[in-house]
Image (cartoon, rainbow, N blue to C red):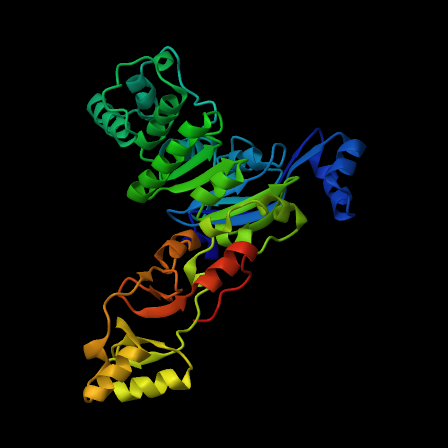
Amino acid sequence: MAENNKKIFCQNLWKIFGSNPESAFHMIKNGASKQEFMEETGNVIAIRDASFDVKENEVFVIMGLSGSGKSTLVRCINRLIEPTRGSVFIEGTDIAQMNKHDLKELRRHKLSMVFQNFGLFPHRSVLENVAFGLEVRGEGQNTIHKKSFEALEMVGLKGWERSQIFELSGGMQQRVGLARALAVGSEILLMDEPFSALDPLIRRQMQEEFVNLHSKLERTVVFITHDLIEALRLGDRIAIMRDGQIVQLGTSQEIVSSPADDYVREFVKDVPRGKVIECQSIMEKPSAVIPSDQPVTNAIEEMRKKDTGLGFVVDTSGVLKGTLTMDQALATARKGSTKAGEIASQEFAATAPNTQLDQCLQLMAEDDIPVAVTDEKHHLLGVITRPLVLKAVQSGVSVSAEA
């Protein structure tokens, strides 16, 4: 099946809490709202027809306010909560079809969960807390010791192994919970609002450490939060939930630039667009692209035709070699013919396609010299100007410019 190339795939997932959940679907089919359904039956629709996939090594954020269904949804992924209808596939296997033994093995080896309230054992030391999952799995003492110490070092708690939990700050306790999940080597981490109980400064530090840690370990993560800024900062993609439904799913940029409805629009209205929108969304074609092996006279003709005083010089494979101004080209032409690449200036600003607009503004001179957008091999992809950036920061963008 097509879902097999996804780490997680949820299809038409429903969760209805109550005495007779199957009786609900007739009302739902006839258009009953969540509130109407609850008043009529006493049952609660927690998840309503949710479908999404999570790619390998992706940080997939599920974001919503209290009661939106996000925590119920993540618990359906590991069957801590049994879905009413629908399927959850882990690496192509429907976990609804797993027996108790297989489900237990899945949780021990494939899935780990990090909770908001840390879920630590107060009577155990830091090391003993981290070792717990390995002990349950039946690992040998040498393996337990080695993996636990390695996990604590990953999260910056080396030297705290013998400490008691009550001796640690909230941020440190959350690191212990994360280390416990990492120690068992699970490929998938389910993180249910892991930083929401922390003070704002510690929370931001943990977010930054999480980003750095994920870039090194490359785990698949489903991350639950009620904080949009946290979602935008951490997520490769974000699913926004309301009343049990996923109302929008996309990248940070897609959600901020093109909110699906008024509910999402209200969420994102105060988000600093310059910290979300990327250069590749607004870049445009350079006015004049000049082959490096062309005579300067050709460069002058091209810049005049495009009514610009600046050209971008590239080699035959499209690699950016420099910039050339009209004044520079005219002065050189008067001295005799030469190739554009021989006089191209190496002093130009360039940035990657995924650079955020706030950073691009810092690269721009007061006279609005365009910034080149290049890939990792320095091929010229497009350019951005100060007016383009300012317009996008103020109003957002809904579609990428063609470059």
Task: Give the residue at x 72% y 43%.
Answer: 25
As drawn, the residue found furthest toward the top would be: 123
**Residue 1 spot, x, y in % from top left:** 47, 56
x then y, percent, for residue 146: 21, 26
Residue 308 position (above or below residue 389) = below
Left or right, 250 with respect to 170, comes to right
Instruction: Tell me, yes or no, if residue 294 can be seen here.
Output: no
- The answer to whether one can see residue 144 in this image is yes
Rendered location of residue 218, percent (x, y): 33, 44
Q: Is residue 255 above or below residue 128?
A: below
Relative horizontal placement of residue 352, taking residue 192 as reference (left or right): left
* The quadrant where residue 396 appears: bottom right
From the viewer's perspective, is residue 318 above or below residue 333?
above
- Pick whichever, 159 or 2, lies toward us: 159
Q: Splitting the image into 4 quarters, where does residue 295 fall? A: bottom left
On the image, the x and y values in percent for residue 357 come to 43, 55
Question: Residue at horizontal 51%, vertical 47%?
Answer: 272
Q: Residue at x 25, y 82 (%)?
A: 331
**Number of numbered discs:** 0
**Residue in the picture at 39% in, 12% down:** 122
223 to the left or right of 365: right
Quarter holding the C terminus is bottom left
Residue closest to the eye, 121 or 13: 121
